[in-house]
């Protein structure tokens, strides 16, 4: 179907919306006007795609005014705008969250009788309450690292201290890479008027940022950890020699 053949009722049903919502989007300037034949307005594939874009952007947390501004600046490239938005909001980690019960979570943290530990872990973004006694562990990989620390004799409070400090450093590193992207990719693109033909280039640059940031951080951390261990154990061994 390439021509406008849908009435507003049919468009609403196909988009999974009410007629009232479709009309509201149109009055806000979010939806192009229909093709009027006689006294009836007809809608086509572009209207269906626009409603899908609006719904997706709302799911990503954008309000309707922000969506309107995005659509205006996108200059009709709904599909590319949708792809870029999905790329920007996709998790950088490639691991699937796991669901845990409250008893298992308490046992893992050794937190029986200390609900503040779980509250702190939730505040750090390690877990999301799902209702009842079920929680989503956002990063099972980080959870396994915490269990290993516990096995080494590190208590739950100190393990959460480590996570909190790591998060502070990670926030700074993340801000650095995001600023690089904004300065060298997004702002020049924005200053040029966001030309439609360059949307794929900008999206691909954002997608390339993921492995680049991860690889660079891991490599630098490896260098730093090697130096830190050398310094620490060099000093410890030297202290031991002095006492002999």
Image: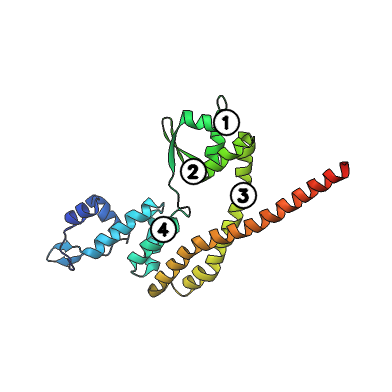
At numbered mark 4, what does the secondary structure look like: helix, strand or loop?
Answer: helix
Mark 4 or mark 2: whose residue is earlier in sequence: 4
Q: Residue 66 has which mark? A: 4
Image quadrant in which the N terminus is located: bottom left
Q: Residue furthest top?
A: 113
Q: Which residue is nearer to you in this view: 149 or 77?
A: 149
Q: Disc 1 and disc 4: Cα gap in Å?
A: 38 Å
Direction from residue 64 to residue 235 in the image, left or right = right
Q: Disc 4 and disc 3: Cα gap in Å?
A: 29 Å
Residue 120 against residue 188 in the figure, above or below = above
Q: Residues within 10 Å of mark 4 (few under 14, many from 20)?
A: few
Mark 1 or mark 4: whose residue is earlier in sequence: 4
Q: Disc 4 and disc 2: Cα gap in Å?
A: 34 Å
Q: Which residue is mark 1?
A: 116
At numbered mark 1, what does the secondary structure look like: helix, strand or loop?
Answer: helix
Foreground mark, 1 or 2, reads: 2
Q: Residues within 10 Å of mark 2 (few under 14, many from 20)?
A: some
Q: Which residue is mark 2?
A: 140
Q: Residue 168 has which mark? A: 3
Direction from residue 147 to residue 230 in the image, left or right = right
Q: Which residue is nearer to you in this view: 165 or 148?
A: 148
Q: Are marks 1 and 3 in contact (CB under 8 Å)?
A: no
Query: On the image, which quarter does residue 52 sit in?
Result: bottom left
Residue 122 lies, in percent from the top left, at 52, 38
User: Residue at coordinates 45% horizontally, 69% vertically from top-left?
Assistant: 202
Mark 3 or mark 2: whose residue is earlier in sequence: 2
At numbered mark 3, what does the secondary structure look like: helix, strand or loop?
Answer: helix
């Amino acid at each position: 179907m390439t021509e406008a053949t849908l009435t507003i009722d049919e468009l609403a049903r196909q988009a999974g919306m009410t007629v009232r919502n479709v009309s509201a989007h149109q009055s806000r300037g979010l939806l192009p006007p229909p093709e009027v034949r006689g006294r009836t307005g007809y809608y086509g594939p572009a209207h269906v795609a626009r409603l899908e874009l609006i719904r997706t952007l709302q799911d990503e947390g954008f309000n309707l005014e922000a969506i309107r501004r995005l659509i205006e600046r996108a200059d009709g490239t709904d599909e590319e705008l949708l792809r870029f938005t999905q790329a920007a909001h996709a998790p950088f980690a490639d691991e699937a969250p796991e669901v845990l019960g409250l008893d298992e979570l308490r046992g893992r943290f050794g937190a029986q009788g200390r609900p503040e530990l779980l509250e702190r872990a939730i505040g750090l973004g390690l877990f999301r309450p799902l209702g009842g006694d079920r929680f989503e562990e956002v990063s099972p990989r980080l959870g396994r690292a915490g269990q290993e620390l516990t096995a080494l004799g590190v208590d739950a409070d100190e393990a959460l201290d480590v996570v909190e400090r790591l998060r502070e450093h990670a926030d700074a590193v993340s801000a650095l890479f995001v600023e690089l992207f904004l300065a060298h990719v997004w702002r020049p693109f924005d200053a040029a008027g966001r030309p439609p033909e360059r949307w794929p280039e900008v999206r691909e640059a954002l997608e390339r940022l993921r492995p680049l940031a991860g690889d660079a951080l891991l490599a630098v951390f490896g260098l730093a950890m090697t130096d830190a261990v050398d310094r620490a154990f060099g000093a410890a061994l030297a202290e031991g020699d002095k006492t002999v």
